[in-house]
Image (cartoon, helix red, strand yellow):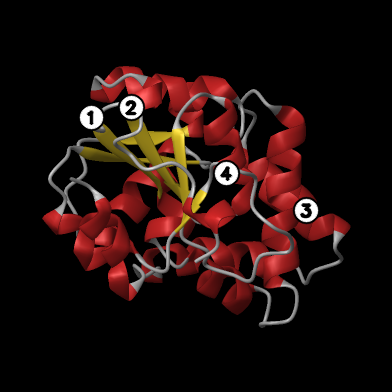
Amino acid sequence: MAASDRGRHPNAIGRPQAVLLDLLMAVMNSLEIWNSAADGERGIAWRDAVTDRMGAAGVYVSYDALVVEAARDLGLPRTAVPRLREGWDRMRPWPDTVALAGLSLPYAFVTNCSASLARRASALSGLGPRFTLSAEEAGWYKPSAEIYRQACARIGSEPARTLFVAGAAYDARGAQAAGLQAWLVPRRPLARHLHAGIRRLRSLDELAAGIP
């Protein structure tokens, strides 16, 4: 692992107090249901288009509306949105998420979707986070700093001593900008190098093993 990928060690500014994880990419394999809803052709592009809209909005606006708008603009079939809604409850966790049960620190999930969808996805993880904070509840979409800081306050940790595990690079950069220690477990190929200070994980097993 290159020095730029390793980032700073969690002991650099004291022992971490808590771990926050992105729910829909780092923990759950949401990519599978987006691809299935769009017949495997433009599912990822659709998801990325929704992410772009969330970043542009900043404050929370209807997640469902963003999904519908992005599908329309991409020219997806009318069946795509209802198929995504129906497929949500078939979402599965990534195999390495079992490592989270062995964490020595409290952990919670943070996610860019509605409160209802967040609860459903969290239940499907089979894990026991302290809480799941949705963008709807926070009032902000990631990568806005406010949602990361709300999660830190809720779990009772200082941002500088909180590990945030992202499944996508934009989310890791947002957490880093908010003052958290950003780690990334890439769930899809990276388009570019990570920012300095973001640690790259091969799997969540490495996360559990790397926390003192």
Residue 171's disc is 4
SS type, badge 2: helix
SS type, badge 3: helix
Mark 4 and mark 1 lie on one chain; the one further toward the N terminus is: 1
Pick the front one: 112 or 79: 112
Circle nearer the viewer, 2 or 4: 2
Total tally of numbered discs in the picture: 4
Name which residue lies at 12% across and 45% down: 104
Q: Which residue is mark 2?
A: 161
Circle nearer the viewer, 1 or 3: 1
Mark 1 and mark 2 lie on one chain; the one further toward the N terminus is: 1
Quarter location, residue 107 = top left
Distance from disc 1 to disc 3, alpha carbons, whole Å, reads 38 Å
Circle nearer the viewer, 3 or 2: 2
Q: What is the three-letter code of the residue carrying label 3? A: Ala
Name which residue lies at 61% across and 43% down: 196
Q: Which residue is mark 1?
A: 17
Question: Is the residue under label 2 in contact with that under label 1 (CB below 8 Å)?
Answer: yes
Name which residue lies at 28% across and 22% down: 157
Distance from disc 3 to disc 2, alpha carbons, whole Å, reads 36 Å
Q: Which residue is mark 3?
A: 70
Distance from disc 2 to disc 4, alpha carbons, whole Å, reads 17 Å
Relative height, residue 139 to residue 63 (above, below): above
Distance from disc 4 to disc 1, alpha carbons, whole Å, reads 20 Å
